[in-house]
Amino acid sequence: MSELQQPKLYQEQAKQQCALLENTWSILDQATADLKNQELDIPPDVYTSLRTTKSLIDLCRTHSRLADVSSREIDGYLGFCVGCCGQDVVTRVKCELKNVEDRLIIQAMNQRGKDFALRLQQKTVKAWEPLQKRIITCIESLPQAIKVQRDVVSGYHKNIEENLSFWLAVEEDIVSSYTNLIKKTDDVKFNTTLASIITDTKDHIEALESTRESFKKIITNNERHAMMLEELQQEQVGK
């Protein structure tokens, strides 16, 4: 594939993705409004991210040459994922929307409980269904291959790491809080119940820490693969 064809291919794929992401945005925006109407406290940064994401989707769908949009320009939009995604507007939009979804579910869990949060999650997961098709149908050049490896690191790792950190913090707070509650009462049933939950929660913490280490290995491999491909590309240029 020629250098002239690559930006055109990216442009077409990005616009297709952004058209689908606009529907995802609409579902999450409506979910936010519904939760607000049910008197849940919505963090201000959720609204900031939704405004940013809508602007980035409009940019993606209307810009005549997305390959010319700089990372600095994209990072000029406020949100959860500033600095995460370079020039890739699609990855930035996905990162923002994933963070919005996670914040809404965490807020629902904290204020209304697990069952309410689960029902919300069942709604929001449908927002992503149109995007489950393969994004990469065919890699036809080394620059494309390098970009794929780099995008895994920039577009997914930071988001996953951040959410794992939040999750771990919640589990650790449960252990600490329940341990303090046990110290305040001699109620046998109460203490036995909380002690059982603490044991399970410690298992959760161990599993999450193991998951984090597994993701770190994946990211390390992807960074190494990108370097290998870049070396190969340099060798081919030198021939």
Image (spheres, grey):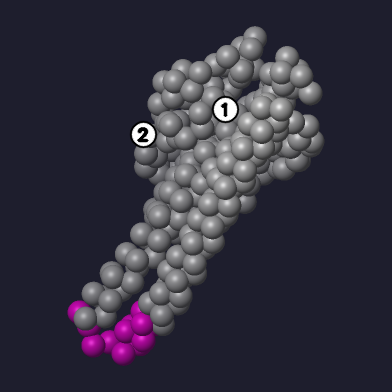
User: Which residue is at the far bottom?
Assistant: 188
Is residue 76 visible in this depiction of the protein?
Answer: yes
Q: Is residue 178 left or right of residue 69?
A: left
Residue 160: x and y, percent?
50, 49
**Residue 140, located in which quarter of the rendered image?**
top right
Q: Residues within 10 Å of mark 2 (few under 14, many from 20)?
A: few
Residue at the disc numbered 1? 88
Residue at the disc numbered 2? 44
Looking at the rendered structure, the secondary structure element under dot 2 is helix
Is residue 108 visible in this depiction of the protein?
Answer: no
- Identity, as a three-letter code, of the amino acid under mark 2: Pro
Where does the magenta region start and end?
Answer: 184-195
- Residue visible at 48% across and 41% down in the picture: 99
- Residue visible at 61% across and 18% down in the picture: 67
User: Which residue is at the far front?
Assistant: 239
Q: Residues within 10 Å of mark 1 (few under 14, many from 20)?
A: many
Question: Which residue occupies the foreground of this view, 214 or 93?
Answer: 214
Q: Which mark is residue 10?
A: none
Query: In the rendered image of this protein, does residue 133 appear above or below residue 218?
Result: above
Check if residue 186 falls in the magenta segment: yes
- Identity, as a three-letter code, of the amino acid under mark 1: Asp
- Residue visible at 53% across and 52% down in the picture: 220
Magenta span: predominant SS is helix
